[in-house]
Amino acid sequence: MQLTRTQRRDDTVVALVCLALGLAAIWESRSFPEAAGGYPGPGLFPTLVGAVFAVCGLLLLARVLLSLRRTRPPEGASTTRGEAVERPTRRALLNAAAILLAVPVYVFLSDVLGFFLTVALVVGGLMVVLGTKVLKVAVPVAIGVAGFVWYIFGEILLVPLPSAIWEG
């Protein structure tokens, strides 16, 4: 895949930010206390998230470096300095807005609807906005993700999760 100069620049910035955030999360999570008896402590999740961020940053950086090797002009070929800047489409802006709104929607709805239902609605809603099929993909994945995350945090790690107002 060939990347334009603008894409390479943008991807490099995102890769470096992801790498820096990931390494910072890993570094900071080292200061969290350890749980007794060899159980996962409060630093486990930030360490995992930091590792995922760092790996994604490295992969994106590798993609940029590989695209540089593929796009080098042959010796003696002339290069053009200016490249057309692509404007984001309306659909891309809608997708970005939906993703950015997902966190505040979760924050406001979780105390009313509870963790499971709010996560299922947010994940399913994002999938629908991003163009997946509602009944075949969005609904089962949203329920599966909400259940998986609830089980990991609520049952295994014993994190207190918001309950719905009708649950007391």
Image (tube, helix red, strand yellow):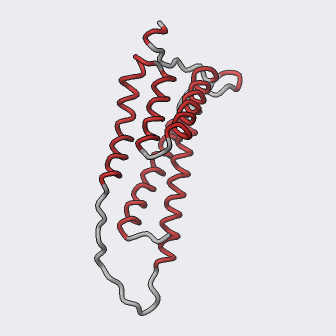
Q: Does 139 sit left or right of 88 as displayed?
A: right
Depth order, front residue of 9/116: 116
What residue do we see at 46% from left, 72% from top? 2
Residue pushed farthest right? 37
Residue pushed farthest top? 168
What residue do we see at 46% from left, 14% from top? 164
What residue do we see at 51% from left, 23% from top? 116
Depth order, front residue of 164/7: 164
In terms of image quadrants, where is residue 80? bottom left
Q: Position of residue 107 (x, y in %)?
A: 38, 26
Q: Position of residue 64 (x, y in %)?
A: 48, 66
In terms of image quadrants, where is residue 103? top left
Q: Position of residue 51 (x, y in %)?
A: 56, 45
Q: Does 50 sit left or right of 104 as displayed?
A: right
Depth order, front residue of 151/142: 142
Residue pushed farthest bottom? 76
Q: Does 41 sit left or right of 79 as displayed?
A: right
Q: Is residue 22 above or below residue 121?
A: below
What residue do we see at 36% from left, 29% from top? 105
How many numbered callouts?
Answer: 0
Q: Position of residue 16 (x, y in %)?
A: 44, 55
